[in-house]
Image (spheres, rainbow, N blue to C red):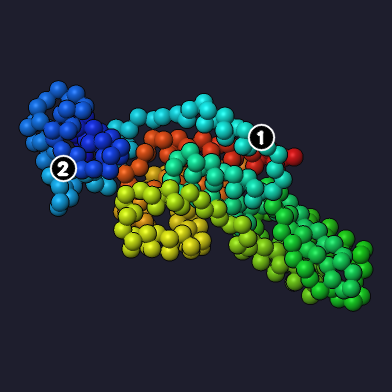
Amino acid sequence: MTLDERKKRILWAIIQDFIATAEPVGSRTLARKYNLGVSPATVRNEMADLEEMGFLEQPHTSAGRVPSHHGYRYYVDHLMQPTELAESEKELVRVSFETKVKMISEVIQRTGQLLSQLSSYAAMVVSPCANRTRLRHIQLVSMGRGQAMLLVVLEPGIVQHRMMELPPDLTSADLETISQVVNAKISGSQMSELKLTIIREIYAELLRHKSLVAMIMDLIEDSSRSKEDRIYLGGIFNILNEPEFNNVEKVKTLLGLLEQEELICGILSEQDQPGVNVRIGSENSCDDIKDCSMISANYEIDGQRIGSVAVLGPTRMQYAKAISVVEYLTANLSEVLAKMYRS
């Protein structure tokens, strides 16, 4: 829907004012604060038109107007001015990521902390999902007493391990042979793309160790479903401090959602477009966040999506700032993980 320039200016001013104050906006306030060049009566008529067009809503208890979800969408798509992080904020990110870390989980945690700190909203970071990452190699390490540790090394440097029982007649040389054959077949494969033909080839070459190979393949598959360190949640009190969440039932609903990690992972997995994705209110697939906005993006290594970051806040959100935070941190996270992988 096309708006003329005056309606655009008035809608922009209403949203700016409501984001700043959380109070319904009246025509007299707009005319006084935003130098619109028209009388309060004209502003009032334009606001009535914008309400009729679905861009504004009028709370029952107020003469002022507030933006609708449709109004916020028009604002984000057509009226919002992009913004950059301040140099001090960029420096904070640089210093945080330059500090030496060895574990992917540490990088994920730092990213989440920065997201919530810089955006002032709740932050979510989904760790590299195992079934979307590639296998580097496996290694069988004898632990003595008929046991071995299976190490499954995924890109970008994620290591998962499982203990397994060994047949009594198995030697260290057998373990080495099994590791070599399995690695020759699966190294570089995506976890979700392990073909039945590859598995059959492994069985054919290691027929003598068929039962052990079956156990190894089951454990590799189990690694792809691991929930360990799947998601970082932070800054929850940021969103609970917003006036929209003074309602106890709303708080209970939101906290209940944030306890369901698998549900959150599912919501973020819907992010299948490049760049930053903005979902406003009713655009969210989950009913529990229909009063919230979520800004999300995927982080990648060599063009391969391996995880997601997001901020969650009220629909009355500082969209330009939140978008720039998500965009900047996603790019930096991708770069840090790529360096960890290559090293």
Q: Is residue 322 above or below residue 42?
A: below
* Residue plotted at (84% across, 71% down): 147
Q: Position of residue 123 (x, y in %)?
A: 48, 48
Q: What mark, if any, has residue 98 been given in the picture?
A: 1
Q: Which residue is mark 2?
A: 64
Give the secondary structure at mark 2. loop
Is 248 in front, or is 194? Answer: 248
Q: Residues within 10 Å of mark 2 (few under 14, many from 20)?
A: many
**In the rendered structure, which amino acid carries the disc numbered 1?**
Glu
Answer left or right for 306 relative to 240. Answer: right
* Residue plotted at (51% across, 62% down): 262
Which of the two labelled residues, at mark 1 and mark 2, occupies the earlier sequence position? 2
Of labels 1 and 2, the one closer to you: 2
Give the secondary structure at mark 1. helix
**Quadrant including the C terminus:** top right
Marks 1 and 2 close (CB-CB < 8 Å): no
Q: What mark, if any, has residue 331 been given in the picture?
A: none
